[in-house]
Amino acid sequence: MAASVREKQTVALKRMLNFNAPPLKNTTAEPVWKVLIYDRFGQDIISPLLSVKELRDMGITLHLLLHSDRDPIPDVPAIYFVMPTEENIDRICQDLRNQLYESYFLNFISAISRSKLEDIASAALAANAVNQVTKVYDQYLNFITLEDDMFILCNQNKELISYHAINRADIQDTDMESIMDTIVDSLFCFFVTLGAVPIIRCPRGNAAEMVAVKLDKKLRENLRDARNSLFTGDNMAAGQFSFQRPLFVLADRNLDMATPLHHTWTYQALIHDVLDFHLNRVVMEEGSGADPSAGARPKKKSRKMYDLTAADKFWQKHKGSPFPEVAESVQEELDAYRAQEDEVKRLKSIMGLEGEDEGAISMLSDNTAKLTSAVSSLPELLEKKRLIDLHTNVATAVLNHIKVCSSQFAAVCHCRRLFKPNFLFLVKGPSRQFACLNPLNTACICVTLLTAVFQNIKLDFSFPVIFQIP
């Protein structure tokens, strides 16, 4: 079975963290201890794929942001994973002048230009650190993988390539070219990581065609130079001459405007809609404040973060399930955990039997193997308990938001029952004011649902939009 996008990018990251050499498997030798320096783009790429424990297992003792205040560690090599921007290049040159690390392994998320590479060389020469710059690589990892077969182009400055940015009325040709180049660069990096040259299909006369033409040109330019092609090396391996090429279909968002407005009742969709959910991480505020009437100082709510990763079996199984089924599944998992916990307690009590009763001694010997198995499964049991607590907290937070929204819908539903004629919800231009009108000239009321929907989806309201509610 072909490797997924997540596996491909994870392998590329682990190779980079091992000084761009394949990591050794089943080895007992200690890894080379090193420091990882990344910018916000690199952090967004790594965080959904590698945990802190996995980074530590690969020898990463410290991971820091490039533009943070960093102390010198002169006896440790440093691996950089950054975008080749002017600000990042200047900071790397500053690190070379300050002699922060023993050696420098520079890995750029996308291809670095020759002029910026010359700037680094000049800075290394001026700082007498030429021998310390060990390797410079273009990693072509400028995309973020969230699931096995799903990725996004970027998380930082994502509004710059959004639907609103492309379709705004005052966009300039230079801005459009910049947006297209950014999208094409991420897609090119995706296919380099995948190790496949796609067959591109797209409709004519819109932004999708512009992206397709630019991507096709970039792929052809790379394939033209066979010696330096990114698709004829280790990425393609023995299958570089295979006729099995993926089909890449590019479509314009205008072809289907209803889907972004469709909010389903599934677990993953609800978490995305009502909670702070980014890059497979949920951030929630927990803790109840003191009663203000009692004169006590209110307590600050604590922020807790939960990672919903591929290792979470409950998440992988139920993220597409309806929310009521998820609540039942959480209860079932909790009951199963309590049953296992009670079994361990029962075995522990049996092991404590004393006396000369032969029946007790026989029962003790029969249950020794069971207790040994139960003790060996304790780490798995504790991990199961952690996941149950995680999803209990997340599901409770989702339910609380649903209760708040249900009370806000009450007024709208009441007005709908009063008048048989259909309501027309009118969106008034860029101000995003929503009013409910009916043929009987009733008072205007605010529609909270539509407000929430359009706050999350940036659209260009240059003309009124009418929504017919049956």
Image (cartoon, rainbow, N blue to C red):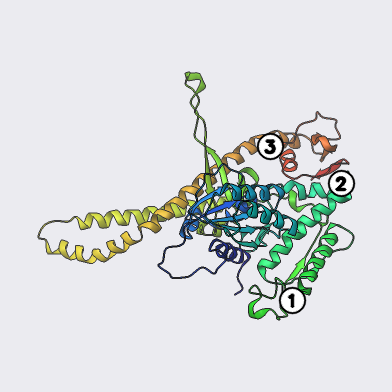
Disc on res. 289: none
Residue identified by numbered label 2? 171
Question: Residue at point 77% right, 31% down?
Answer: 445
Q: In the image, 227: left or right of 302?
A: right
Residue identified by numbered label 3? 409
Quadrant of the snapshot with the C terminus: top right
When asked about the image quadrant of residue 429, the answer is top right
Q: Secondary structure at mark 1?
A: loop
The amino acid marked with disc number 3 is Phe
Distance between mark 3 and mark 1 Cα atoms: 62 Å
Upstream in the sequence, badge 2 or badge 3? 2
Residue identified by numbered label 1? 226
Q: Residues within 10 Å of mark 3 (few under 14, many from 20)?
A: some
CB-based contact (under 8 Å), mark 1 and mark 2:
no
Q: Nearer the viewer, residue 339 or 119?
A: 119
Q: Is residue 233 visible?
A: yes
